[in-house]
Image (cartoon, rainbow, N blue to C red):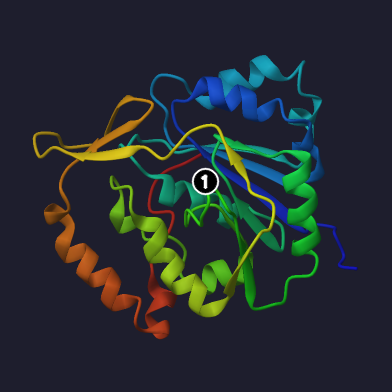
Amino acid sequence: MKDIKNFITLCVPYYNDPHRLREFLLNDYLCIFDEVIIVDDASPDYPALPIIEDMRGECPWLDFDRFHLYRVQEDYGFNAHGARNLAASESNCEWLFFVDVDMILDKKFLEGFFLQLFNTEDEQTLVCNVHGGDPSNIFAARKENFFLAGGYDEELRGYHMGDKLFRERLDILAEPIMVEPELQCNRRGRKVVEDDNILGTLYPDDKTVIQRSMKHIQDTLDMIKERNKSIMDWNFIPIVQFDWK
């Protein structure tokens, strides 16, 4: 049996989704994690702090020392990659488990997840079956492997596409193993719509993301894909390149 002290951190990025954040925080199973880190990606309309403060009476685990909230200081439109890097940097545990607030951590999934996690080899990660497949961004990895892979590419700030590029590196270092029980999600992935008349990233509804076309970052994409080919370059990927508190 592994030593479960400081074993796993639940890492959760959040942005302007108060209803789902409340549902997520009401989950009794949050208390089984050794640490929970929520990173508010500078939500302009519904910041996480007042929501959490309002829920302390309903959720006693929010007062535990192992529960942490951080906030990115500037709204970049989409900076979930940076939010995940920040959570990983502040984690005090061996394992990092990345989920979003629309994930449903129920008993069946968690029992299977922890059973597999305790038997995972050093050079393996656990990926979650969401809607019948690996969504790339919902996975558990050793903190050491996360940083050996360089963390997420923050150069892609503003674009919903960095998970697969990061996983290209991580999957080389640690074989992805699918968790057997399916992880339930109360929302399908948002459809990405391109619009070159905007500068940032917009969320007009619960199903849509509007962002500029990829042609604006093609040089950056080419650089990252080239960087992915050389393990030696992964040590120099800049992370947490923003102000936070």
Q: Amino acid type of disc 1?
A: His
Using residue 57 as the reference point, say whether residue 48 is left or right of it.
Answer: left
Q: How many marks?
A: 1
Relative height, residue 126 to residue 38 (above, below)? below
Identified at 57% across, 24% down, the residue is: 49
- In which quarter of the view is residue 94 placed? bottom right
Nearer to us in this view, 168 or 74: 168
On the image, the x and y values in percent for residue 137 come to 49, 53
Identified at 61% across, 22% down, the residue is: 22
On the image, the x and y values in percent for residue 231 come to 42, 83
Q: Local crowd at mark 1 within 10 Å, few (<14), some, or many (≥20)? A: some
Identified at 49% across, 79% down, the residue is: 172
On the image, the x and y values in percent for residue 245 come to 52, 38
- In which quarter of the view is residue 69 placed? top right
Relative height, residue 232 to residue 96 (above, below)? below
Q: Is residue 238 in view from this perspective?
A: no
Q: Is residue 240 in view from this perspective?
A: yes
Secondary structure beneath label 1: loop
Using residue 235 as the reference point, say whether residue 214 is left or right of it.
Answer: left
Identified at 29% across, 48% down, the residue is: 159
- Tag 1 residue: 131
On the image, the x and y values in percent for residue 21 come to 57, 27
Q: Residue furthest right?
A: 1
Query: Which image quadrant: the N terminus?
Result: bottom right
Nearer to us in this view, 22 or 131: 131
